[in-house]
Amino acid sequence: MTAQAFFQVLASGLLMGLLYALIAVGLSLIFGLMDVVNFAHGEFLMVAMYATFGLWAIVGVDPVLLMPLVIAFMFVFGAAVYLGVVRFAMRAKTNSGMVQIFATFGLAILIQGVSQLLFSPDYRSIPASWLGGRTVSIGGVFLPLPQVYGGLISVLAFAGLYLLMSRTDFGKALEATREDQGAVALVGIDRNKVFALGWGLGAALVGLAGSVLAIFYYIHPQVGGPFALVAYVVVALGGFGSVFGALAAGLIVGVVESFAAIAMPPAMKSIPVYLLYLGVVFIRPSGLFGRL
């Protein structure tokens, strides 16, 4: 492999890894906040992609400009899912963990069914956009503009998330609730409000990823499944509940997958990722940056 080819593969892996991290961070945030795994996470991504496509079809505005509307819609959608589904599942007196799992899994099936009813199983795409189909060359390394844009958005999202969690009252309340849900009630913090806002924030982050993916990826009712599977691996690899561990793990997964696609048939490129994940689970079950 030449040096140019090496840097080409590395850059592609890093850009895809940033997108994986952006997809996974909402899942990690919710788990760290409530110890709940959202099995409808892939469907949240699919809803964001359909929202981007629908707004583009109706308004005719480029997806880049539609991103704030998609983020706002997904924030409301995520908060509504908590208030309408998850909040009641958490009240189960027995087998609460299983109730939460089946509640979100059932929600995933419902969202998929509704999307097939409304949009059919057909593949859809946004054929023309400001970034679609364009590339940029940096030192002989060719990078697709949509992935470059997605990588920049991911970096900005993590920077904004850091500022939110470290510099705002909501971020401090969120972190306090992550540390001790019982203690925060004693100081007057409404736990249900924090949970609803946390679900809204997690959905908004995956909505951000969905609006980027809609620019260059096909949209269909099952589109979220493969990305959700990678997101679960990223969360487990980075550490359950570790928000910024998801960033590091996403980059690792993207790079490993990118080099694996060169070394073996494309259909097998995920095998090294899962082998790496299994190795980390056996050696450090809490993940690279998490704790049990």
Image: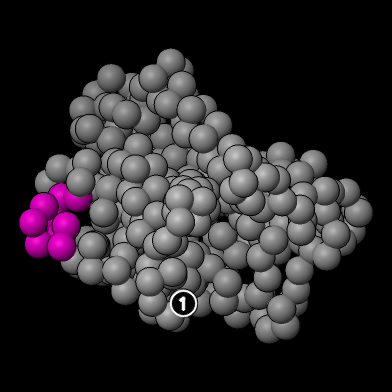
Image coordinates for residue 289, horizontal then vertical, percent: 22, 41
| Colour setup of the view | one colour
Q: Residue at x 70, y 45 (%)?
A: 136
The residue range painted magenta reads: 279-287
Q: Is residue 201 left or right of residue 141?
A: left
- What residue do we see at 83% from left, 65% from top? 127
User: Which residue corresponds to mark 1?
Assistant: 266
Check disc 1: other Cα within 10 Å, few if <14, some if 14-19, many if 20+.
Answer: few
Which residue shows up at 35% across the image and 59% down it?
A: 256
Q: Residue at x 56, y 43 (%)?
A: 151
Tell me the SS state at disc 1. helix
**Residue 100 in view here:** no
Where, by quadrant of the figure, is residue 153 drawn?
A: top right
Depth check: 265 or 121 in front? 265
Q: How many marks?
A: 1
Q: Amino acid at mark 1?
A: Pro
